[in-house]
Image (spheres, rainbow, N blue to C red):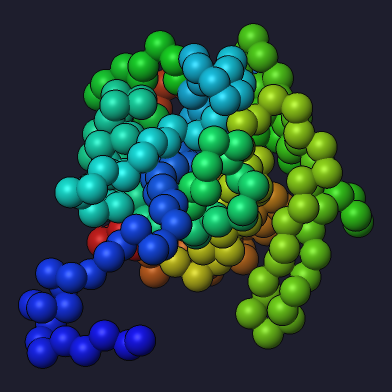
Amino acid sequence: MKEEYQNEEEFLKNYDSSQYEKLSLTADILLFSVSDGIKENYRKLNEKYFSILLVKRNGYPFKDKWCLPGGFVEMKESIDEAAIRILASETNLHNIYMEQLYTFGSVDRDPRMRIISTTYMALVDKNKLLEHISDKASWFHVTMIEDETETKIILDNGTETITFNVKKTLISKTTERYQYQITKNDALAFDHAEVIITGIERLKNKVNYTDIVFHMMPEYFTLGELQQVYEILLRKKLLDPAFRRMIGRKVEKTKKMKTGEGHRPSVLFRYKGGKS
């Protein structure tokens, strides 16, 4: 028999939430950066490396496997607040640019219980980091080997190497939406291989139509350094004239010069507007 209530207060007083199954919510952070490698030729720019921050799990499930920084959302905090708290507790990093990436909710994504994850994409210039990352966290350089059917992703922190393979299927031409199927993964916990490839592709797309890349840049930079970052994120070489047209309205020339690195002094530029 359908119960009748006089008002919302009476309804809430008699509401029985036990009739519904419970699920949990986590916030996971996909933190990207671009950093300089070892200079092999003093006349050339440092090679740039695209990096991701992972933490090693010290308990079950997936004990000793690598994963994204993450944790459960508490009852009295928003998801955004949880992401900020988790980033600080898991990595010892603060005041990092973050935006929501996607919500992952596969039924079997966590062996403990039904857990949905709201994932955040975060970007940082390592040179601006004032804190040391926690002992259980490590930066991994990202290498992608792509062919017509699959993409192999290699993550390397200098002592450990993680690889996983991804099959990408177009599911909507109009919105350019893809479905990602992980065909090989031995070292990453949960569904974080899928999260990583989703974030890499989202970042690549956003570089084309936003100024998001400047969250990974120092305040002052040469055009050559900026072009390197664009190329590593877009995964292709850019012709100098085309690149300068692309960023012409985004940067401004300063009176500062970069000197002392074995090549001609270079003019330093900076980003014009608010980062987005």
Residue drawn at point x = 32 percent, y = 88 percent: 2
Q: Position of residue 51 (x, y in %)?
A: 55, 33
Residue 65 appears anywhere in the view: yes
Taking the image as shown, residue 107 lies to the left or right of residue 2, namely right
Q: Is residue 63 above or below residue 83?
A: above
Quadrant occupied by the N terminus:
bottom left
Count how many numbered circles sit on residues in the image: 0
Residue drawn at point x = 44 percent, y = 52 percent: 23
Q: Residue furthest right?
A: 148
Quadrant of residue 3 in the image?
Answer: bottom left
Quadrant occupied by the C terminus:
bottom left
Residue 253 appears anywhere in the view: no
Taking the image as shown, residue 268 lies to the left or right of residue 152, namely left
Taking the image as shown, residue 166 lies to the left or right of residue 76, namely right
Quick one: 148 or 190, which is closer to the camera?
Answer: 190
Q: Is residue 23 above or below residue 152?
A: below
Q: Is residue 179 above or below residue 142?
A: below
